[in-house]
Image: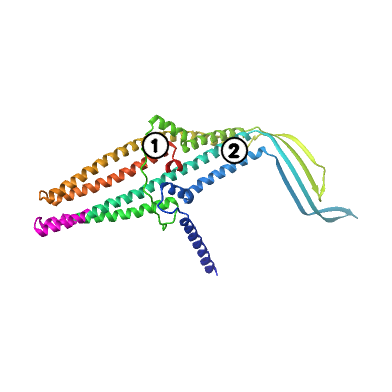
Amino acid sequence: MRSVQSILIGIVFMWAAVTHIEAAQAQLPEGPLTLRDCISIALTYNPSLTSSRQSVVSAEAGLEQARSGYWPQLSFTWVEGLTGTTSFLSVGGRTVGFAGTDVREDVDFVFRQSLWQRGRHENVKANKASLTGASHNYEAAIQSLVEGVARDYYGVLAAESLMEVAQARVKSAKEHLEEVKARVAVGTAAEVEIFPAEDDLARADLEEIDASSNIRLAFAQLKNTLGLAPDTVLELAESAAVEEPSLPSLQEAMKSAYTSRPDLISARASVERSRYSFASAKIRRGPLVEFFGQYQQGYSEWRARDPSWQVLMSLSWPLLDGGATDADETQARAENVRAEADLQTLVNQVGLEVESARVEVIRTRQRVAATAKSVAAAEARLAAAEGKYREGMAIFLEVSDALAALSDARASQVNARYDHELARVRLEKALGRLTPEGLAE
């Protein structure tokens, strides 16, 4: 019976998984996916944001709980059951016990309003800072996800472009092999020149095999980042050429990062929270003071009793607690020092990230221009080698070397282009401006 139940449960889970996958595929946009489409899909299906979002929900609940002390409190108590009593009497020199039972039905309504409580303000402020930190951590998680989507999107496009480079080399190697065989057949070339031509074709085939595998791996990585099933079929649209934006100065970039980076804002909120927590820990050393008013209306056996009200001040002071308050204050002070140190470490790290990102944008921009010249030079070199070979002024090895150089130059050009696209994305993230809308634009 248990095995049958296990099978049924397994079928239910399989059906749920298949239904989820089908739903995810059914809601994908039609046609090739743009970067904007991929970002939207990731924000919908990637599960990595769930944990960060729940931290925000938890922080919101914590703030609501801290603020609840400002509002009136109304409690209801209902007690119903049997009670028993035993009384003893002395009769004729003997003690006789008499037992009795009764039914108890009591209802109490208590209305309480705290007018002022020492430490409540600090507790609310600490929870508000926690919410600020959690919210900006969630924003930082979104920016990290957007960066990951862009990285994998450009990774697929680069792999597809490298496949085109490999296919072009295979086509050229085949044409050269046929040309060499034809020249050998008419006696204008030595038979030994067939071997380097065949080697070129074999190397080109290997590059095409590797390029095909890299495309599959790039798509697998992209689907994982998007939160889609491995068997989802994707087709990407080529990224459109956009005007190169002006690069901000280092001072401008630093200013933007220090004011916009969500992780920095979250770290500052952590410092603020730790300061209020430290203040609360010192307050808990005493005296603990509260002013409050209370109104109580009771019903015994559903008959109203006389109501009572009171306006009181309570004061408590922990005199002996085994060192708990000292430990509490020490822990809060340590958390405050740690939060301030973490903030300074992050500030230093942000400065390094911004400068590194700017340098990388400049480097990749220069590489795009340099590889374009390299491709043009390699194409001219191949054309010259082919012309010399057809005229019998060069051996085929010169053509082979020129073909390999052209393939390498084209591959470098592809990598330089998409490295530059990704460098721009990472600079936006370093500046704290990598929103889904901004990147998609």
Between 369 and 327, the one lying in front of the other is 369
Q: Which mark is residue 324?
A: 2
Inspect the magenta stretch and tell me whether residue 23 lies in it.
no
Q: Secondary structure at mark 2?
A: helix
- 179 versus 375 height, above or below: below
Q: Which mark is residue 353?
A: 1
Q: Residue 52 appears at what percent x and percent y?
A: 50, 45
The quadrant in which the N terminus is found is: bottom right
Q: Is residue 224 above or below residue 128?
A: below
Residue depicted at 40% across the width and 29% down the height: 251
Q: CA distance from mark 1 to mark 2?
A: 42 Å
Q: Nearer the viewer, residue 363 or 127?
A: 363
Please name the amino acid that badge 1 sits on.
Answer: Glu
Q: Residue furthest right?
A: 92
Residue 67 image-quadrant placement: top right
Q: Is residue 434 left or right of residue 318?
A: left
Residue 256: image x %, image y %?
A: 44, 33
Mark 1 neighbour density, 10 Å: few (under 14) some (14–19) many (20 or more): some
Q: Give the structural element (helix, strand or loop) at label 1.
A: helix
Instruction: Using the rendered image of the protein, determine whether residue 334 is visible from the camera's viewpoint.
Output: no
Compared to 373, does 101 lie above or below?
below
Q: Which residues are magenta?
A: 172-198
Residue 436: quarter of image? top left
- Magenta segment main secondary structure: helix
Q: Nearer the viewer, mark 1 or mark 2?
A: 1
Q: Picture coordinates of residue 108 (x, y %)?
A: 76, 46
Q: Residue 241's quadrant in the figure?
A: top left
Report the label total.
Answer: 2
